[in-house]
Image (tube, grey):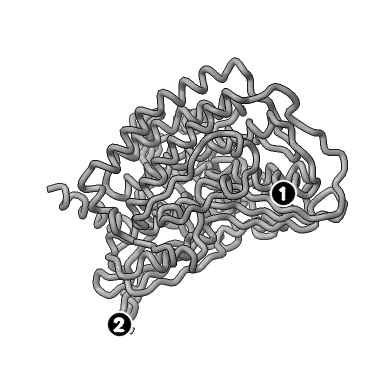
Amino acid sequence: MSLKLKALTKSIWVYHLCTGGSCNNCDIEILDLLTPRFDVERFGIMLVGSIRHADALLVTGSLTLKALECVKRVYEQAPKPCLVIAIGSCACGQGVFANGPTTPNPVDSILPVDIYIPGCPPKPEAMIAGVVKLIGKLKEKK
Amino acid sequence: MANKIIPIGPYHPLQEEPEFFRLHVDGEKVVDMDIELGYNHRVIEKISESKSYDQVTFLVERICGICSTSHPFAYTNAIDDLLGITVPERALYIRTVIGELERIHSHLLWLGLAGHFLGYNTVWMWAWRYREPILDIFERVSGNRNHYAMFKPGGIRRDMHEEDFPWIKKTLKDLIPKFDMFKGAVMDDPVIRARTEGIGVLTKEDIHDYSALGPTARASGVSIDVRKDEPYAAYDKVEWKVITHEGGGVFAKLLVRVLELYESADIIIQCLDKMPKGDIDCGIKDMPIGEGIGRHEAPRGEVFHYISSDGGNSPARHKIRAPSFMNIFSNKKAVIGETISDATIILAAVDPCYCCTERMAVVDYKSGKRIMDGQDLIRLSQEKTERMRK
């Protein structure tokens, strides 16, 4: 396993990217992860304010046209390798807004998604389980 | 123009509706403000016209994650108005219970974020921790922590079980001492008081001028509440009062929201006690041609839905107006003349746009150069609290 990947499995710093076209619930559940009941900071997972500090992107929402360019630019600025975690039905498969005129592009047509966490919204436990699986997948790569 | 401009926005995950604020500043003072709407536009009204009446309930639920009962509530009220039907009594009580549970979780969420931006992260952690029991109740009742899918036109989708009631009542009663703690934190802490009292004051005239709604209006002494003014569901069958405060500032808005927590808990317990047995759905067969309006007092103010039916399977026209749409324009009045470090809490006080402050950036108007970003502004706000504590 390369040094970069090995470092990535230790304590993942995440950047939360709402792609527009989201109802906020996934975003609230992500914040909920930081509060006392779930408290993912125990595992070294921390929400950071700048994409340049991030190891992983938490992508929510069904990607509106207006946000498309911003999302692309954010991903370009991320230090690579960067994991992309699609959270919620909207980010996984556009959910209820699949036929919306302003949300024609699925998130995974723009970003290389590493793991999908479905649910509307997914429970915080599901998000933790998803990240654990992702770390397992990285370790298998060697 | 020598003024500098602070852009806030355009969109941020925790906002009710994405919006874009442009603060014109002269030194530390805010002298003018522009508001721009239209981001995160998902064309929900149009999508609604392509879904059946039953499916629209799920769609309107996803307008906003925090108000995910308010929109279905107003929508089902609109359908009931269109059909002119009487919804079974038990369904009305359960609707009320879900609506009030949502108010508690929404107000706690806001309280936590208010604490965060004032530099009291403890308040944030506490408020969100005591929000969890409410989400547990939702999970037990509806099967999901958010997006409860409890509503359907003409009734509710699933029943509440009598054997859960003692547990729900106990959970709520256990929360009352926690509410006391928040009330104590707001009322007695000299620093929170100094940071919020008399800041961003809106007078009664301002509220009328800007047509502000909900806790924003009630904190300026305007007693406006759809639940009282035009009772629906079970709100006229239980005892409760409209909380108002004459202050008009951020402190008044904090206090109104904290006191509403008690009223909501009280309404839920009364509803559980009085809930009759019986049907939960009146089984709608046909949709006649016609139109209906539905209103509901969401945690942020009045939600309004209008449905026009052409007798078909889906709405011919669906018009939605959310409360933040009315409230955010009152920011223009509240924020002018205040300092930048207070702007975060004032913009947050109407509860549409708390975390957009993370995207704040102070930009030199002429050179377009970035002077401060959102993190700096939050730091400014937190430092001010720190100074006052000493």
With respect to residue B362, does A104 lie above or below?
Answer: above
Going by the image, does B181 lie left or right of A14? left
Label 2 neighbour load within 10 Å: few <14, some 14-19, many 20+: few
| Label annotation for residue A81 | none
Q: Is residue A105 visible?
A: yes
Q: Give the residue at mark 2.
A: B2
Pointer 2 indicates a residue of which chain? Answer: B
* Residue closest to the eye, B34 or B302: B302
Residue A66 occupies quadrant: bottom right
Q: Give the residue at mark 1.
A: B78
Q: Is residue A134 visible?
A: no
Q: Position of residue B27 (x, y in %)?
A: 24, 73
* Residue closest to the eye, B139 or A93: B139
Question: Which mark sits nearer the N-terminus, 1 or 2?
Answer: 2
Q: Position of residue B62 (x, y in %)?
A: 62, 46
Q: Position of residue B325 (x, y in %)?
A: 54, 60
Under mark 2, the amino acid is Ala
Under mark 1, the amino acid is Ala
With respect to residue B103, does B269 lie above or below?
Answer: above
Q: Position of residue B272 (x, y in %)?
A: 57, 25
Identify the residue at image location x=43%, y=24%.
B173
The nearer-to-camera label among 1 and 2 is 1
How many dots with numbers?
2
Question: SS class of the residue under badge 1?
Answer: helix
Residue B145 occupies quadrant: top right
With respect to residue A132, does B32 lie above or below?
Answer: below
Q: CA distance from mark 1 to mark 2?
A: 50 Å
Question: SS class of the residue under badge 2?
Answer: loop
